[in-house]
């Protein structure tokens, strides 16, 4: 973005906004004031089930069922054997893929997620393996890169479906 380290960066601060300008790049940010939810209330503290899978294999499977079906809603079904992914459309029918589980604790689970959001999360993870924690049908799914030490986690909220 910046051509070299010698280029000047201009910083403008106006009330609750800040603007950074360097070459043709301009970044603006606004301070948002208000009461925000407590982080402890947003991140689930316990979970019902957890699976460990290969990140690259999971990414490929999510991309397959999301892109091929042309739908952003995908269904995840975890059994003791595999994590099954499914997308259903009237035009194409069912698109399925599965990812072998490396580990599983807890009960089988099924949940629907926005596949495009899931792809964005998985693409940002630089870890060979990823843990997926199921906390309930109406609660966020917690996605944790399997790196030590890890203070990073991702949340993705479920999508309500008819099935």
Image: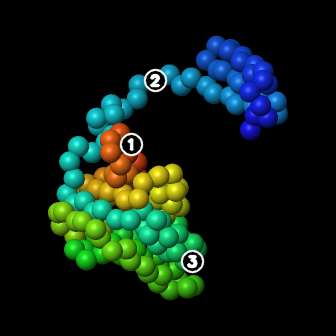
The crowd level at tag 3 (other Cα within 10 Å; few <14, some 14-19, many 20+) is some
Q: Quadrant of residue 14?
A: top right
Judging depth in this view, the residue of 84 and 15 nearest the camera is 84
Tag nearer the camera, 2 or 3:
3
In the picture, which quadrant includes the N terminus? Answer: top right
Tag nearer the camera, 1 or 3:
1
The residue that disc 2 covers is 34
Quick check: marks 1 and 3 in contact, CB under 8 Å? no
The residue that disc 1 covers is 152
The tag earlier along the polypeptide, 2 or 3, is 2
> Residue at image x 47%, y 52%?
126
- SS category of the residue bearing label 3: helix
> Residue at image x 78%, y 23%?
6
> Residue at image x 18%, y 67%?
107
User: Considering only vertical position in the picture, is 77 above or below 7?
Assistant: below
The residue that disc 3 covers is 68
State the image coordinates of residue 158 (x, y, percent, origin top left).
38, 58
Q: Work out how far the residue at label 2 is from the one at label 3, CA to CA, in angstroms.
A: 42 Å
Q: Work out how far the residue at label 1 is from the one at label 2, CA to CA, in angstroms.
A: 25 Å
Q: Work out how far the residue at label 1 is from the one at label 3, CA to CA, in angstroms.
A: 30 Å
In the picture, which quadrant includes the C terminus? Answer: bottom left
């Amino acid at each position: 973005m910046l051509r070299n380290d010698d280029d000047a960066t201009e910083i403008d601060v106006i009330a609750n906004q800040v603007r950074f300008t360097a070459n043709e790049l301009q970044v603006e940010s606004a301070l948002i004031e208000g009461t925000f939810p407590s982080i402890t209330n947003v991140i689930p503290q316990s979970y019902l089930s957890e699976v460990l899978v290969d990140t690259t294999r999971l990414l490929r499977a999510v991309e397959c069922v999301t892109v091929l079906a042309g739908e952003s809603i995908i269904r995840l079904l975890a059994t003791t054997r595999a994590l099954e992914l499914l997308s259903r459309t009237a035009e194409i029918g069912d698109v399925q893929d599965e990812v072998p589980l490396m580990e599983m604790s807890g009960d089988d689970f099924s949940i629907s997620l926005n596949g495009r959001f899931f792809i964005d999360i998985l693409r940002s993870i630089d870890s060979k393996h990823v843990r997926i924690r199921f906390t309930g049908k109406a609660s966020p799914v917690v996605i944790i890169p399997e790196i030590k030490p890890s203070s990073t986690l991702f949340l993705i909220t479920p999508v309500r479906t008819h099935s």
